[in-house]
């Protein structure tokens, strides 16, 4: 718990939280962008290449080998940060969570207005007929998952080279533009266009909670280097 942050929360009425992978690492979900020895042993390409639209189309089976192994983490539960944000929404203080994460943990924690900029692993659809599938259809399949119509099932996640969903972007911009307090947490603000949404914030206070420096640090009213779960926990 951070007293300076709590004072800002207490006086604010329209809080928006903008978060990234660091929010979910405390739930046991690794940041795939931090390359470890396992990648080098098991995969011939870096994560950013595998998780691209081109790679998905050209090497679909290899894409799914990586995707099942690294992106579908079983048993992950919301942590203190997810739970506090959901409580702030119930209290009428937080208007939206804008997240770059695709794990669905904000929704699992009880947050209602969650703008998932990069989609969700929990949603999948047939590229041929559009039929919807849950996460188990991918997790329990082998090779390339197929629809009953024979089409390829694709995760509803935004791959590299793909555009963000326009409605999600519009909702995020609207929430950020009307916020009086913006809390940025667990993100290095290195992934665009998502990170560029901060320029729409016109409110009173910007809080940055991240273990490493970010481009927004110089604009922050409050800069916190502690773990986000411990920072937001009551």
Image: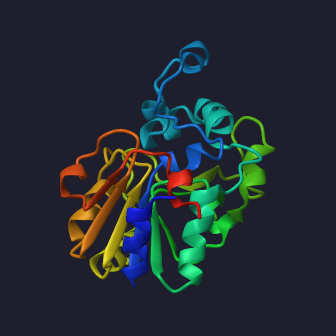
Q: Nearer the viewer, residue 127 or 215?
A: 215
102 on left or right of 167 = right
- Splitting the image into 4 quarters, where does residue 39 fall? top right
136 on left or right of 153 = right
Which residue reaches farthest right? Answer: 140
Where does residue 177 sit, x and y in percent of width and height? 27, 78
46 on left or right of 184 = right
Q: Residue at x 39, y 45 (%)?
A: 225
Which residue reaches farthest left? Answer: 218
Q: Residue at x 38, y 64 (%)?
A: 4
- Splitting the image into 4 quarters, where does residue 90 fall? bottom right
Where does residue 120 sit, x and y in percent of width and height? 58, 58
Where does residue 87 sit, x and y in percent of width and height? 60, 75
131 on left or right of 13 = right
Q: Nearer the viewer, residue 36 or 118?
A: 36
Image height check: is 95 above or below 233? below
- Splitting the image into 4 quarters, where does residue 222 fall? bottom left
Q: Residue at x 40, y 76 (%)?
A: 15
Image height check: is 173 above or below 67? below
Q: How is the image coloured?
A: rainbow
Which residue reaches farthest front? Answer: 3
Q: Nearer the viewer, residue 112 or 2?
A: 2
Q: Residue at x 32, y 79 (%)?
A: 179
**Residue 85 visible:** yes
Where does residue 172 sit, x and y in percent of width and height? 37, 72
């Amino acid at each position: 718990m951070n007293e300076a942050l709590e004072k800002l929360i207490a006086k604010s009425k329209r809080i928006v939280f903008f978060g990234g992978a660091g929010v979910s690492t405390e739930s046991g979900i690794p940041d795939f962008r931090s390359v470890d020895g396992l990648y080098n042993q098991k995969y011939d390409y870096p994560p950013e290449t595998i998780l691209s639209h081109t790679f998905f189309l050209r090497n679909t089976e290899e894409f799914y080998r990586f995707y099942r192994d690294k992106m579908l983490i079983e048993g992950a539960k919301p942590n203190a940060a997810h739970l506090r944000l959901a409580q702030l929404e119930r209290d009428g203080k937080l208007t939206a969570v804008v997240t770059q994460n695709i794990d669905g943990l904000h929704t699992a924690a009880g947050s209602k207005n969650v703008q998932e900029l990069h989609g969700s692993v929990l949603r999948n659809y047939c590229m041929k007929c559009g039929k919807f599938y849950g996460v188990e259809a991918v997790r329990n399949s082998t090779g390339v998952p197929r629809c009953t119509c024979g089409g390829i099932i694709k995760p509803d996640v935004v791959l590299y080279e793909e555009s963000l969903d326009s409605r999600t972007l519009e909702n995020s911009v609207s929430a950020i533009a009307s916020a009086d307090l913006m809390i940025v947490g667990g993100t290095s603000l290195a992934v665009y266009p998502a990170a560029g949404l901060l320029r729409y914030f016109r409110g009173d206070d910007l809080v940055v909670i991240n273990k490493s420096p970010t481009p927004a640090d110089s604009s922050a009213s409050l800069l916190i280097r502690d773990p986000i779960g411990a920072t937001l926990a009551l």
